[in-house]
Image (spheres, rainbow, N blue to C red):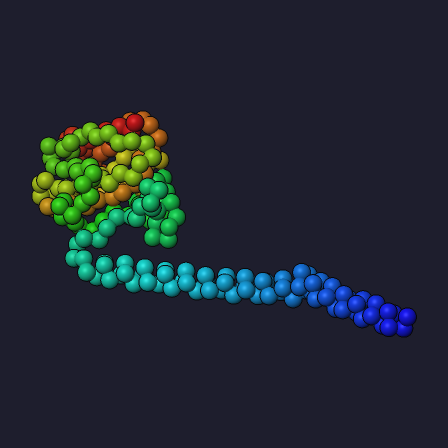
Amino acid sequence: MEVAVKLIITILFITLIALTMVFFGIFGIAPLTRLVNKVDKEDINTIVVTEEETETDVIIEEELQGLQEDARVTSPVTEEGEVVTQEGVPVKLDVEPGTPDAPQQSNPISEEALPEDTIKLQASAAGFSPNTFTVRSGTAVTLSLTTADDRSHVFKFNDPTLSAVAIGVGTSKTRAITFNAPAKGEYSFFCDVPGHAGRGETGTMTVK
Ligand SMILES: [Cu+2]
């Protein structure tokens, strides 16, 4: 009889220890371990992302240094086709040209270096050539302006919602700007050099 009681007590004792281990396993030590692991992984991810950005910065800088001084590019375009600032924020089209939120015009660039789908305009006393072009609403449009005479020219839209989209070029130079085409409609443009619009340097962009 005494032996049976001892056996039952031993079994109960072992069961208690086992239950305690399971309890701590579920609610105690194991979740803590998981939490620590999670924190570690997040830290690692943060570090990795930072390193990637640094590497990208270095690559971009090297690429810029490798390019000729006169081949500085326009504002970057995301994979989704949105034109953004250097900080990755979508550009604004109703701000002063050249301000940080505006799409940036390139430095003087050769026409051959421009993307294939660039809309290439020439400006001279004879006007813009072509003086009409059509783009699709929302798409990233690269527009270039080349002077075809010995004057400077400044491309601007009349619509204040596109005030940021402007290109100013000197003699025999080409510059480009990239922006997302606005809502469907017709947008007239002109040369902002005094006297130039009056002699016919005007045109229309159609957005479909
Ligand atoms: Cu002009």
Taking the spot 46% from the left edge, 64% from the top edge, the residue there is 44
**Residue 180 rendering spot, x and y as whole percentages:** 32, 38
Q: Residue furthest left?
A: 149
Q: Is residue 1 above or below residue 104?
A: below
The answer to whether any part of residue 96 appears in the image is no
Between residue 48 and residue 24, name the one nearer to us. Answer: 24
Above-or-below relation of 207 to 192: above
Q: Considering depth in this image, is 81 or 199 the residue closer to the camera?
A: 81
Q: Residue furthest right?
A: 1
| Count of numbered marks | 0
Q: Determine the residue positioned at 23% across, 59% down.
A: 63
- For this view, does 53 lie left or right of residue 174? right
Task: Please name the residue shown 30% across and 48% down the image.
Answer: 76
In this rendered view, identify the residue nearer to me: 5 or 201: 5
Residue at 31% x, 46% y is 77
- Quarter in which the N terminus is drawn: bottom right
Report whether 103 appears left or right of 39.
left
Q: Is residue 196 left or right of residue 7?
A: left
- Splitting the image into 4 quarters, where does residue 27 fall? bottom right
Q: In which image quadrant can residue 4 be found? A: bottom right
- The part of the image, by quadrant, that contains residue 164 is top left
Position of residue 78 measured from the top left corner of the image (x, y, whole percent): 33, 46
Residue 111, position in %: x, y? Answer: 14, 45
* Residue 74 appears in the figure: yes
Quarter of the picture holding the C terminus: top left
Nearest the viewer among 101 and 96 is 101
99 over 124 or under it: above or below:
below
